[in-house]
């Protein structure tokens, strides 16, 4: 009953409330509640009579819901689908916060970057062996795959099913002319695209796949201790990172409180309550493999969402990855 | 003379008005130029994106293929934090992008720039087009748009800077205008100052070098000075001449009539006496008229100096003593305290006192006293002449002067009154309570 009033066709994956205060700010977000809960709790503790309702949904549904017209109850939209977020702002669904937001990375003072998800490659040491130490760059990986006679299975996000996968593939193409060579080589062995990071990680842990290309690092971190065979590869040519962003929809009920929450999340205290892997400061971390390339908050991202661009991409994708299909 | 306008004020006002108009004109034109040049800059950023997309168009089995180049859009995104829109159509069919982007193409130009309000914001659009099929008129159009907010803000900022610069220039020019006006009016102010300190009888021409604009004024002034000097000289000559030319015949008449009075038979003696009296009166009147003219002249040329009043009065009393003795009248001069020196016209004061003293001696009975008392009352030196005569018919000076038209007093009191006035003082007359008249000339100390 409640969800029907939020937006057309939005089926929340979860509906959580933090705190009991009467001043409630409602967040529509893609991230797992468990991961953002400490930050929301910190925000509630910091003020009096506050509470946060967190509605978890998929990025695609959130995008559609915003376009269909959100309920005024939604005060903040937080998502890791940076391309969709940018397009929503470009199409005029956000509102300017520039007067109040001073130093945080943002676009147009409307879309605020509050976390970074570094992208890594996951390997199963047991299956790849000692060679794993040579795989310092994508070029090295391509070379290694070329000369690897033993068939191995690799997995990555299926760009058709996963928005993140499509976004990462396009960004790889922008960074690296060898992307299609990599897909060729992975396809020469066995490429098993997956919809979701969970499945990809599971495959590597179980040994079903030797390698998972473009995995969100923060999903992997908790597994490292329980799965000693699994190892993170950070290539030294470049490392992508997906920004998590938030904006206050035009017509939000409680703009001021939402802005306070957003400011809290980007503040030092808010950041300290995030997983160390996704803090904005991850940009400057010392163990990075190569230059960190966070996806820029740029309206150019809308171009890749265009069906024309998608068609052009999948035309090549299907050719390059079809061998195992 | 009070003037309610000044050349400087008026010229300054005209200057200000002109500067204001110029400033507004400069502000308006430059901000228009700035906005236009910034718009040109934005157009230069937009145009290549549209052209790159248009250039990527190739024919294919389904119709056409084209790229949406991420990097080109990225360049556009880097240029300003603006929203960007695009649209690709083939004829009426929308192939990519925002299908509600205005792409109305009139005329035949291959590239059109337009500004529309799109999705609530002023947006600049460039539309490029070309024919793609040899056997059809179908055109591919590519429209790329970018909102203008930051360009408009920038234009506004530049315009504000220009406004500030114009204002500063305006202020400097205003100061400059004031200074130059002051400079231009300097000769006029100089002449005014020169005239102010000039002695009343100084009619020498103005020698200062003056600009052409006021040289006529100065010439006229000098001519007026000249005329004035002539008039004054004539006046002086007249007084001197008249004194001689009129007094002499009257004196002759007087002598003759006295002679006649003595020599004529008893029957005609009364008429001769009458003639003598009238001649004496005429002589006195002429003397007084000339005295008045002479005093007027002295007043005009400013003949004041520091005088020792007591010494002056002593001199007068000494001179009048024979007249008084002839009538068996004694003149006493008193001063209640030491009398400071007085800035006055010696001759005028002397004549005034003589006049009053003469009256007093004439009207006081024989064997009485005429007193001259000098005192200082509330900052004024009072010279009182007291007699024991019949007194005045009235306290009112005007009434007394009128009454004196019969010839007893003549012009005397009026002359005294004028002298007192010309020294910022006054003449008061009254009767003494115990009989007699009291005339007081009160003069402010310096």
Image (cartoon, coloured by chain):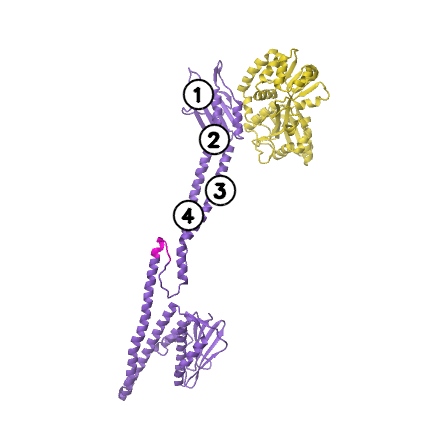
Chain colours: A yellow, B purple
Q: Indicate the secondary structure of the residue bearing disc 4.
A: helix
Rendering coords of residue B225 (x, y %) = 34, 62
Q: Residue at x 55, y 15 (%)?
A: A315
- Residue A154 versus residue B255 in the image, above or below: above
Rendering coords of residue B45 (x, y %) = 49, 28
List the residue tagged with mark 1: B130
> Pointer 3 and pointer 4: residues touching (CB < 8 Å)?
no
List the residue tagged with mark 3: B164
Q: Mark on residue B15?
A: 4
Q: Indicate the secondary structure of the residue bearing disc 2.
A: helix
Q: Which chain carries label 2?
A: B
Q: Nearer the viewer, mark 1 or mark 2?
A: 2
Q: Mark on residue A281?
A: none
Does B388 sit left or right of A103 as displayed?
A: left
Q: How crowded is mark 3: few (under 14 residues within 10 Å), some or many (20 or more)?
A: few
Q: Distance between the residues labelled 3 and 4?
A: 19 Å
């Amino acid at each position: 009953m409640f969800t029907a009033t939020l937006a057309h066709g939005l089926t929340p994956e979860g509906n959580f409330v933090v705190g009991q205060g009467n001043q409630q700010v409602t967040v529509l977000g893609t991230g797992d509640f468990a991961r953002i809960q400490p930050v929301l709790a910190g925000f509630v503790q910091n003020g009096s009579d506050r509470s946060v309702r967190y509605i978890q949904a998929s990025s695609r549904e959130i995008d559609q819901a915003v376009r269909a017209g959100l309920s005024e109850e939604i005060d903040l939209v937080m998502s890791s689908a940076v391309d969709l977020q940018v397009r929503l702002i470009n199409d005029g669904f956000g509102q300017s916060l520039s007067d109040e937001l001073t130093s945080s990375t943002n676009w147009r003072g409307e879309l605020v970057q509050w976390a970074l998800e570094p992208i890594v490659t996951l390997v199963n040491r047991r299956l790849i062996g000692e060679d794993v130490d040579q795989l310092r760059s994508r070029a090295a990986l391509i070379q290694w795959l070329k000369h690897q006679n033993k068939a191995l299975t690799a997995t990555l996000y299926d760009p058709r099913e996963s928005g993140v996968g499509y976004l990462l593939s396009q960004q790889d193409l922008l960074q690296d002319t060898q992307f299609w060579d990599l897909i060729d080589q992975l396809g020469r062995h066995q490429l098993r695209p997956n919809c979701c990071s969970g499945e990809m990680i599971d495959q590597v842990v179980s040994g079903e796949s030797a390698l998972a290309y473009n995995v969100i690092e923060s999903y992997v971190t908790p597994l490292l201790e329980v799965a000693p065979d699994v190892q993170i590869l950070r290539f030294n040519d470049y490392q992508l990172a997906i920004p998590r962003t938030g904006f206050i929809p035009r017509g939000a009920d409680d703009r001021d409180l939402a802005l306070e929450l957003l400011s809290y999340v980007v503040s030092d205290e808010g950041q300290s309550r995030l997983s160390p892997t996704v803090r904005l400061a991850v940009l400057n971390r010392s163990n990075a493999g190569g230059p960190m390339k966070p996806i820029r908050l740029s309206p150019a991202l809308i171009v890749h969402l265009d069906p024309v661009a998608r068609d052009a991409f999948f035309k090549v994708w299907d050719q390059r990855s079809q061998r195992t299909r | 003379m009070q003037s309610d306008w000044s050349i400087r004020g008026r010229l300054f006002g005209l200057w200000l008005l002109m500067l204001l108009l110029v400033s507004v004109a400069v502000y308006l034109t430059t901000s228009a130029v700035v906005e236009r040049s910034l718009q040109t800059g934005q157009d230069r950023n937009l145009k290549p994106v549209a052209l790159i997309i248009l250039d990527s168009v190739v024919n294919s089995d389904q119709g056409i293929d084209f790229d949406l180049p991420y990097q080109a859009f990225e360049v556009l995104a880097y240029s300003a934090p603006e929203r960007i829109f695009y649209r690709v159509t083939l004829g009426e069919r929308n192939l990519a992008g925002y299908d509600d982007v205005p792409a109305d193409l009139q005329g035949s130009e291959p590239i059109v720039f337009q500004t529309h309000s799109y999705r609530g914001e002023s947006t600049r659009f460039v539309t490029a087009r070309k024919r793609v099929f040899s056997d059809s008129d179908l055109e591919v159009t590519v429209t790329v748009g970018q909102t203008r907010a930051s360009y408009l803000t920038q234009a506004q900022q530049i315009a504000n800077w220009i406004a500030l610069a114009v204002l500063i220039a305006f202020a400097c020019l205003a100061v400059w205008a004031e200074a130059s006006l002051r400079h231009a009016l300097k000769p006029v102010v100089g002449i005014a100052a020169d005239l102010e300190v000039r002695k009343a009888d100084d009619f020498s021409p103005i020698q200062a070098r003056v600009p052409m604009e006021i040289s006529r004024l100065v010439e006229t002034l000098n001519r007026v000075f000249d005329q004035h000097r002539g008039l004054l000289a004539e006046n002086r000559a007249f007084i001197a001449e008249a004194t001689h030319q009129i007094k002499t015949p009257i004196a002759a008449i007087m002598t003759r009539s006295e002679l006649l009075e003595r020599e004529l038979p008893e029957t005609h003696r009364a008429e001769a006496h009458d003639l003598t009296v009238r001649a004496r009166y005429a002589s006195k009147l002429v003397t007084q008229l000339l005295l008045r003219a002479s005093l007027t002249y002295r007043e005009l040329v400013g003949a004041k100096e520091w005088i020792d009043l007591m010494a002056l009065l002593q001199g007068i009393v000494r001179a009048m003593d024979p007249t008084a003795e002839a009538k068996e009248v004694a003149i006493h001069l008193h001063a209640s305290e030491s009398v400071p020196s007085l800035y006055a016209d010696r001759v005028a004061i002397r004549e005034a006192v003589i006049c009053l003293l003469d009256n007093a001696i004439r009207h006081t009975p024989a064997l009485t006293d005429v007193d001259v008392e000098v005192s200082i009352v509330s900052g004024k030196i009072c010279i009182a002449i007291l007699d024991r005569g019949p007194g005045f018919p009235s306290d009112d000076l005007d009434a007394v002067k009128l009454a004196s038209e019969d010839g007893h007093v003549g012009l005397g009191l009026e002359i005294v009154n004028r002298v007192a006035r010309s020294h910022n003082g006054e003449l008061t007359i009254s009767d003494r309570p115990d009989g007699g008249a009291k005339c007081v000339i009160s003069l402010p100390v310096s």
